[in-house]
Amino acid sequence: MDIDLSSPKYYSDGEGDQPPDDLLPHSKRAPDDIFLTHLNEVYNRYVDRDQHLISLPKGYTMYYCNLVIHGIRQSDGFRSTHIFGHPKGSYRCWKQFAVHVASIVKGDLENCACSLCVEREPPDLLKKGEKEVKIKKEELSD
Ligand SMILES: [Zn+2]
C-alpha cells in the first residue's frame, strides 16, 4: 500500500529544523530521495512491511554530521546521520524515527512511543515551573 505523507490527511509535527549553529558547519543535508529510501528501509523492517512511503513527512530533514571522537571533529569519512524536525530534538536512531513516522501515518502523535515523544521535560524547566506556581500562591495569600 502506498502512503503519501505529503497529503493533508497526514498531520506532521515536523518543524523544518536544521542542525544547531555549532553543528551546522559540520553538517551536510542529504537529498530527499536518499532520506526517503533510508526511511522506507527502516519503516519496512520495524513497522510495516507492506506499506510504502512515497513522500517524506513534512518538516523533517536528514543531515550527515561529522562525528566527534575523543574531542576531535572527524573528516567526512566519519559521518553519522541525524534527522531534524522534531519539536524536542533530533534523531540519531532511525528505528525511533520510524516509530514516530508510524504515529504520523496512524494520526496518533499524542500517543507516540518514540524516544523524543516520551522524553520528560528537562528537570530545570520543571523546577522553574514549580517556582512560578509558588510565587503566584504567595501573591494570592497577600
Ligand atoms: Zn514520536
Image: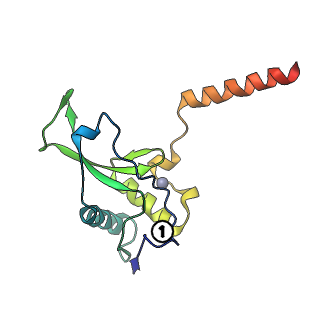
Is residue 83 visible to us here?
yes
Q: Is mark 1 within 8 Å of ligand 1?
A: no
Residue 98 versus residue 28 in the image, above or below? below
Q: How many marks?
A: 1
Q: Residues within 10 Å of mark 1 (few under 14, many from 20)?
A: some
Q: How is the image coloured?
A: rainbow
Residue 39 versus residue 138 in the image, above or below? below
The answer to whether 68 appears left or right of 134 in the picture is left
Quarter that holds the N terminus: bottom left
The answer to whether 118 appears left or right of 35 in the picture is right
Which residue is painted at 50% across and 43% down in the image? 119
Considering every residue shown, the one lying at the far top of the view is: 142
Task: Depth check: give the residue in front, 79 or 96.
Answer: 79
Considering every residue shown, the one lying at the far right of the view is: 142
Q: Where in the figure is residue 81, as x and y percent of width and height?
A: 26, 49
Quarter that holds the C terminus: top right
Task: Depth check: give the residue in front, 42 or 22.
Answer: 22
Q: Where in the figure is residue 141, as x and y percent of width and height?
A: 87, 21
Residue 128 versus residue 105 in the image, above or below? above
Disc 1 residue type? Answer: Val
Which residue is painted at 28% across and 61% down in the image? 35
The answer to whether 65 appears left or right of 60 in the picture is left
Which residue is painted at 22% across and 33% down in the image? 68
Q: Where in the figure is residue 38, as x and y percent of width and height?
A: 27, 62
Q: Where in the figure is residue 55, as x and y percent of width and height?
A: 36, 70
Considering every residue shown, the one lying at the far bottom of the view is: 1
Element type at mark 1: helix
User: Mark 1 highlights which residue?
Assistant: 105
Is residue 66 visible to us here?
no
